[in-house]
Image (cartoon, coloured by chain):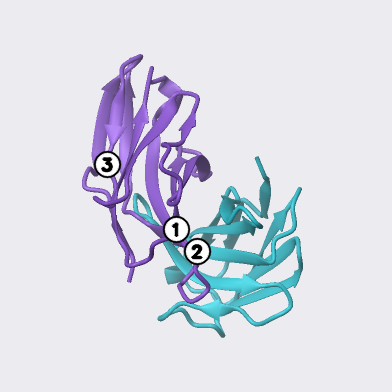
Chain colours: A purple, B cyan
Protein backbone atom coordinates (compact mmCIF):
# COMPACT_ATOMS: atom_id res chain seq x y z
CA UNK A 1 0.00 0.00 0.00
CA UNK A 2 1.09 3.51 -0.69
CA UNK A 3 2.00 5.74 2.21
CA UNK A 4 2.90 9.41 2.37
CA UNK A 5 4.95 10.79 5.24
CA UNK A 6 5.34 14.39 6.28
CA UNK A 7 7.80 14.42 9.16
CA UNK A 8 7.40 18.09 10.06
CA UNK A 9 4.10 18.70 11.90
CA UNK A 10 4.89 22.41 12.21
CA UNK A 11 7.21 24.84 10.48
CA UNK A 12 7.68 28.58 10.64
CA UNK A 13 9.32 31.07 8.32
CA UNK A 14 10.00 34.77 8.37
CA UNK A 15 8.14 36.82 5.82
CA UNK A 16 10.13 37.14 2.56
CA UNK A 17 12.33 34.18 3.47
CA UNK A 18 12.39 30.71 1.93
CA UNK A 19 11.10 27.53 3.53
CA UNK A 20 11.14 23.90 2.45
CA UNK A 21 8.52 21.35 3.47
CA UNK A 22 9.46 17.68 3.34
CA UNK A 23 7.50 14.76 1.99
CA UNK A 24 8.46 11.15 1.38
CA UNK A 25 6.32 8.39 -0.01
CA UNK A 26 6.41 4.68 -0.49
CA UNK A 27 5.13 2.93 -3.58
CA UNK A 28 5.91 0.04 -5.87
CA UNK A 29 4.38 1.84 -8.85
CA UNK A 30 6.56 3.35 -11.54
CA UNK A 31 4.12 5.95 -12.76
CA UNK A 32 2.13 8.25 -10.53
CA UNK A 33 1.30 11.83 -9.67
CA UNK A 34 2.35 13.85 -6.68
CA UNK A 35 0.61 16.95 -5.38
CA UNK A 36 0.93 19.64 -2.78
CA UNK A 37 -2.30 21.12 -1.47
CA UNK A 38 -2.65 23.98 1.01
CA UNK A 39 -5.51 24.37 3.46
CA UNK A 40 -5.70 27.89 4.93
CA UNK A 41 -7.88 28.72 7.95
CA UNK A 42 -10.91 28.86 5.64
CA UNK A 43 -10.34 25.09 5.23
CA UNK A 44 -10.66 25.28 1.45
CA UNK A 45 -8.20 22.80 -0.06
CA UNK A 46 -6.22 24.55 -2.79
CA UNK A 47 -3.94 22.85 -5.29
CA UNK A 48 -0.48 24.36 -5.09
CA UNK A 49 1.56 22.27 -7.49
CA UNK A 50 1.54 18.95 -9.33
CA UNK A 51 4.32 16.67 -10.53
CA UNK A 52 4.12 13.74 -12.92
CA UNK A 53 6.57 11.01 -11.95
CA UNK A 54 7.69 10.40 -15.53
CA UNK A 55 8.89 14.00 -15.82
CA UNK A 56 12.42 14.59 -14.63
CA UNK A 57 12.01 18.34 -14.58
CA UNK A 58 10.83 19.75 -11.27
CA UNK A 59 7.49 21.53 -11.38
CA UNK A 60 7.35 25.25 -10.65
CA UNK A 61 4.43 27.60 -10.03
CA UNK A 62 5.55 31.16 -9.38
CA UNK A 63 7.05 31.18 -5.85
CA UNK A 64 6.40 27.48 -5.34
CA UNK A 65 8.72 24.79 -6.63
CA UNK A 66 9.37 21.15 -5.87
CA UNK A 67 12.45 19.01 -5.54
CA UNK A 68 11.37 15.63 -6.87
CA UNK A 69 13.82 12.80 -6.23
CA UNK A 70 12.20 9.68 -7.67
CA UNK A 71 14.85 7.20 -6.57
CA UNK A 72 14.74 8.53 -3.03
CA UNK A 73 10.92 8.81 -3.16
CA UNK A 74 11.14 12.35 -1.94
CA UNK A 75 8.96 15.30 -2.96
CA UNK A 76 9.72 18.51 -1.08
CA UNK A 77 8.03 21.88 -1.57
CA UNK A 78 10.01 25.11 -1.56
CA UNK A 79 8.24 28.37 -0.96
CA UNK A 80 10.28 31.42 -1.89
CA UNK A 81 9.66 34.99 -0.73
CA UNK A 82 7.13 33.76 1.83
CA UNK A 83 4.04 35.87 2.30
CA UNK A 84 1.58 36.09 5.16
CA UNK A 85 -1.04 34.52 2.93
CA UNK A 86 1.07 31.39 2.64
CA UNK A 87 0.25 30.48 6.24
CA UNK A 88 -1.72 27.25 6.04
CA UNK A 89 -1.67 23.51 6.55
CA UNK A 90 0.17 21.91 3.64
CA UNK A 91 -0.63 18.37 2.55
CA UNK A 92 1.49 16.21 0.29
CA UNK A 93 -0.51 13.69 -1.74
CA UNK A 94 0.15 10.75 -4.02
CA UNK A 95 -1.96 9.14 -6.71
CA UNK A 96 -1.16 6.06 -8.75
CA UNK A 97 -2.00 6.00 -12.44
CA UNK A 98 -2.18 2.34 -13.46
CA UNK A 99 -5.65 0.85 -13.70
CA UNK A 100 -4.77 -1.93 -11.30
CA UNK A 101 -3.95 0.44 -8.50
CA UNK A 102 -6.08 2.42 -6.11
CA UNK A 103 -6.52 5.74 -7.80
CA UNK A 104 -7.67 7.87 -4.96
CA UNK A 105 -5.36 10.39 -3.35
CA UNK A 106 -3.24 9.26 -0.43
CA UNK A 107 -2.50 12.20 1.86
CA UNK A 108 0.28 12.87 4.31
CA UNK A 109 -0.51 14.05 7.82
CA UNK A 110 0.18 17.67 6.97
CA UNK A 111 2.62 20.42 7.93
CA UNK A 112 1.29 23.55 9.61
CA UNK A 113 3.21 26.54 8.23
CA UNK A 114 3.33 29.79 10.17
CA UNK A 115 4.63 32.93 8.49
CA UNK A 116 6.10 35.46 10.88
CA UNK A 117 5.85 39.17 10.03
CA UNK B 1 -8.38 26.34 -12.05
CA UNK B 2 -11.45 24.16 -11.88
CA UNK B 3 -14.11 25.07 -9.33
CA UNK B 4 -16.07 22.79 -7.05
CA UNK B 5 -18.94 24.13 -5.00
CA UNK B 6 -20.43 22.56 -1.90
CA UNK B 7 -23.68 23.39 -0.18
CA UNK B 8 -24.48 24.09 2.58
CA UNK B 9 -21.32 25.45 4.14
CA UNK B 10 -22.72 24.99 7.62
CA UNK B 11 -25.62 22.98 8.95
CA UNK B 12 -26.94 22.35 12.44
CA UNK B 13 -29.48 19.60 12.92
CA UNK B 14 -31.14 17.63 15.67
CA UNK B 15 -30.14 14.09 16.47
CA UNK B 16 -32.11 11.58 14.43
CA UNK B 17 -32.69 13.81 11.41
CA UNK B 18 -31.10 13.47 7.97
CA UNK B 19 -28.91 16.02 6.25
CA UNK B 20 -28.05 16.29 2.55
CA UNK B 21 -24.86 17.88 1.29
CA UNK B 22 -24.45 18.76 -2.38
CA UNK B 23 -21.22 18.86 -4.34
CA UNK B 24 -21.04 20.36 -7.83
CA UNK B 25 -18.25 20.69 -10.37
CA UNK B 26 -18.98 24.07 -11.93
CA UNK B 27 -16.79 24.21 -15.03
CA UNK B 28 -15.90 20.62 -15.78
CA UNK B 29 -17.47 17.20 -15.86
CA UNK B 30 -16.47 14.77 -13.16
CA UNK B 31 -17.10 11.08 -13.64
CA UNK B 32 -15.55 10.49 -10.25
CA UNK B 33 -16.15 12.39 -7.04
CA UNK B 34 -14.89 11.75 -3.54
CA UNK B 35 -16.21 12.41 -0.05
CA UNK B 36 -13.87 13.06 2.84
CA UNK B 37 -14.22 13.67 6.53
CA UNK B 38 -11.73 15.81 8.39
CA UNK B 39 -11.23 16.12 12.12
CA UNK B 40 -9.58 19.24 13.57
CA UNK B 41 -5.90 19.56 12.71
CA UNK B 42 -5.95 16.17 11.00
CA UNK B 43 -5.58 14.96 7.47
CA UNK B 44 -8.48 14.11 5.21
CA UNK B 45 -10.05 10.69 5.63
CA UNK B 46 -11.60 9.23 2.50
CA UNK B 47 -15.13 8.00 3.12
CA UNK B 48 -16.23 6.94 -0.33
CA UNK B 49 -15.67 7.24 -4.04
CA UNK B 50 -18.64 7.89 -6.27
CA UNK B 51 -18.80 7.24 -9.99
CA UNK B 52 -21.49 8.76 -12.13
CA UNK B 53 -24.30 6.34 -12.76
CA UNK B 54 -23.06 3.58 -10.48
CA UNK B 55 -22.98 2.70 -6.81
CA UNK B 56 -20.42 4.37 -4.58
CA UNK B 57 -17.45 2.49 -3.20
CA UNK B 58 -17.11 2.92 0.54
CA UNK B 59 -13.91 2.74 2.55
CA UNK B 60 -13.60 0.16 5.28
CA UNK B 61 -15.43 1.17 8.41
CA UNK B 62 -17.76 3.63 6.70
CA UNK B 63 -21.43 2.67 7.03
CA UNK B 64 -22.98 2.83 3.58
CA UNK B 65 -26.53 2.86 4.99
CA UNK B 66 -25.70 5.85 7.13
CA UNK B 67 -23.79 7.87 4.55
CA UNK B 68 -25.83 7.64 1.35
CA UNK B 69 -24.06 8.84 -1.77
CA UNK B 70 -25.71 9.59 -5.09
CA UNK B 71 -23.82 10.67 -8.19
CA UNK B 72 -26.69 11.24 -10.57
CA UNK B 73 -24.95 13.45 -13.12
CA UNK B 74 -21.47 14.38 -14.31
CA UNK B 75 -21.56 17.55 -12.23
CA UNK B 76 -23.43 16.62 -9.07
CA UNK B 77 -22.87 14.24 -6.18
CA UNK B 78 -24.78 14.25 -2.92
CA UNK B 79 -23.99 12.89 0.53
CA UNK B 80 -26.90 12.24 2.86
CA UNK B 81 -26.15 11.63 6.51
CA UNK B 82 -29.12 9.61 7.72
CA UNK B 83 -30.32 9.52 11.32
CA UNK B 84 -27.50 11.83 12.34
CA UNK B 85 -25.98 11.55 15.80
CA UNK B 86 -23.61 13.91 17.65
CA UNK B 87 -20.65 11.69 16.76
CA UNK B 88 -21.34 12.47 13.08
CA UNK B 89 -20.48 16.11 13.74
CA UNK B 90 -17.49 16.89 11.59
CA UNK B 91 -16.16 18.75 8.58
CA UNK B 92 -17.11 17.04 5.33
CA UNK B 93 -15.27 17.83 2.09
CA UNK B 94 -16.10 16.74 -1.42
CA UNK B 95 -13.71 16.53 -4.31
CA UNK B 96 -14.11 16.08 -8.05
CA UNK B 97 -11.54 14.61 -10.37
CA UNK B 98 -10.93 16.34 -13.67
CA UNK B 99 -10.11 14.08 -16.59
CA UNK B 100 -7.63 13.56 -18.15
CA UNK B 101 -5.32 15.47 -15.79
CA UNK B 102 -6.22 13.21 -12.85
CA UNK B 103 -6.18 16.29 -10.67
CA UNK B 104 -8.67 16.50 -7.83
CA UNK B 105 -10.29 19.81 -6.97
CA UNK B 106 -11.98 20.31 -3.65
CA UNK B 107 -15.14 21.94 -2.46
CA UNK B 108 -15.02 24.44 0.42
CA UNK B 109 -16.40 21.92 2.90
CA UNK B 110 -19.48 21.59 5.09
CA UNK B 111 -19.41 21.94 8.84
CA UNK B 112 -22.04 19.58 10.27
CA UNK B 113 -23.11 19.95 13.88
CA UNK B 114 -25.57 17.45 15.31
CA UNK B 115 -27.21 18.48 18.56
Q: Is residue A35 visible?
A: yes
Determine whether A109 is above or below B86 in the image: above
Q: Secondary structure at mark 3?
A: loop
The residue mark sitting in front, 3 or 1, is: 1
Marks 2 and 1, how far apart in space? Answer: 5 Å
Q: Same chain for marks 3 and 1? A: yes
Distance of mark 3 from mark 1, alpha carbons? 18 Å
Looking at the picture, how far across and down is residue A12, in whole percent? 26, 28
Q: Which residue is mark 2?
A: A97
Q: Which chain is disc 2 placed on?
A: A
Expressed as whole percent of the image width and height from the top left, the position of residue B13 reads: 59, 65
Mark sitting on residue A22: 3
Which residue is drawn at the image coordinates 54% and 60% (left, top)? B112
Indicate which disc, 3 or 2, sits on the residue closer to the N terminus. Answer: 3
Coordinates of residue B14 in the picture (x, y in percent):
57, 69
Q: Earlier in the sequence, mark 3 or mark 1?
A: 3
Name the residue: 62% across, 50% down: B9
Q: Position of residue B70 (x, y in %)?
A: 69, 75
Q: Which residue is drawn at the image coordinates 51% and 60% (left, top)?
A: B113
Do the numbered discs 2 and 1 sit on residues whose CB atoms are within 8 Å?
A: yes
Question: Looking at this rendering, what residue extends furthest in the left direction?
Answer: A7
Say if mark 3 contacts mark 2, CB within 8 Å.
Answer: no
Label drawn at residue A102: none
Q: Nearer the viewer, residue A92 or A86?
A: A92
Say what secondary structure mark 1 lies in. Answer: strand
Residue under numbered circle 1: A32
Q: Residues within 10 Å of mark 2 (few under 14, many from 20)?
A: some
Label 3 crowd (10 A; few <14 / some 14-19 / many >=20): some
**Residue at image location 39% in from the left, 62% down from the top:** A30
Amino acid sequence: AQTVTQSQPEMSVQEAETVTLSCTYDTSESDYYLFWYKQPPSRQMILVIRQEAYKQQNATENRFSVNFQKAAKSFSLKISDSQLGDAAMYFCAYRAISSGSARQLTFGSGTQLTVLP
Amino acid sequence: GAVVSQHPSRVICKSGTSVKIECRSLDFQATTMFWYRQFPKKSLMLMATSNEGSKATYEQGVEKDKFLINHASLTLSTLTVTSAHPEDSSFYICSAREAPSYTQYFGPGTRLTVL
